[in-house]
Amino acid sequence: MPNNAKIIERALNDFQKVQAHMLAAKRENATETYAGLKDDYISIKVLLTSLGVTLTEIDKIKE
């Protein structure tokens, strides 16, 4: 079973990827894609927050 550091590392990588895709979807006005990514964004954000990670500096979406 992975330790918290591995879980945080993987979740941070996923969080950054999802944010990048969300920003691209927003620029392209891809509302359905954005909505789908937003679900992933919220899930990862909840996970990271529950693990004590402060997202203030890296959260570009702010939703």
Image (cartoon, rainbow, N blue to C red):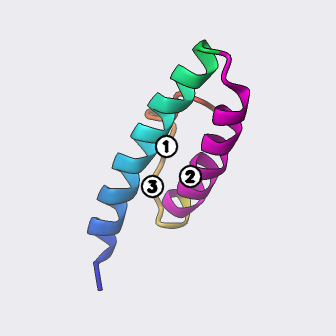
Q: At label 2, which amino acid type do we have?
A: Lys
Contact check, label 2 and label 1, Cβ < 8 Å: yes
Which residue type does callout 1 highlight? Leu
Q: Amino acid at mark 3?
A: Val
Label 2, label 1: how many angstroms apart (C-alpha)? Answer: 8 Å
Question: Which x, y percent locates residue 22?
Answer: 56, 30
Marking on residue 55 = 1
In the picture shown, does residue 56 fall above or below 10?
above
Left or right? Give the position of 44 relative to 31.
left
First along the sequence among labels 2 and 1: 2
- C-alpha separation, residue under disc 3 versus residue under disc 2: 9 Å
> Dividing the picture into quarters, in which one does residue 50 lie?
bottom right
Residue at 53 percent across and 63 percent down: it is 47
**Residue 7 appears in the picture as rendered:** yes
| Residue at numbered disc 3 | 53
Please state which of the two labelled residues, at mark 3 or mark 2, is closer to the viewer: 2
Quarter of the image containing the C terminus? Answer: top right
Q: CA distance from mark 1 to mark 3?
A: 6 Å
State the extent of the magenta-drawn residues as a range: 29-48
Estimate the x, y position of residue 29 in percent, counting from the top left: 67, 16
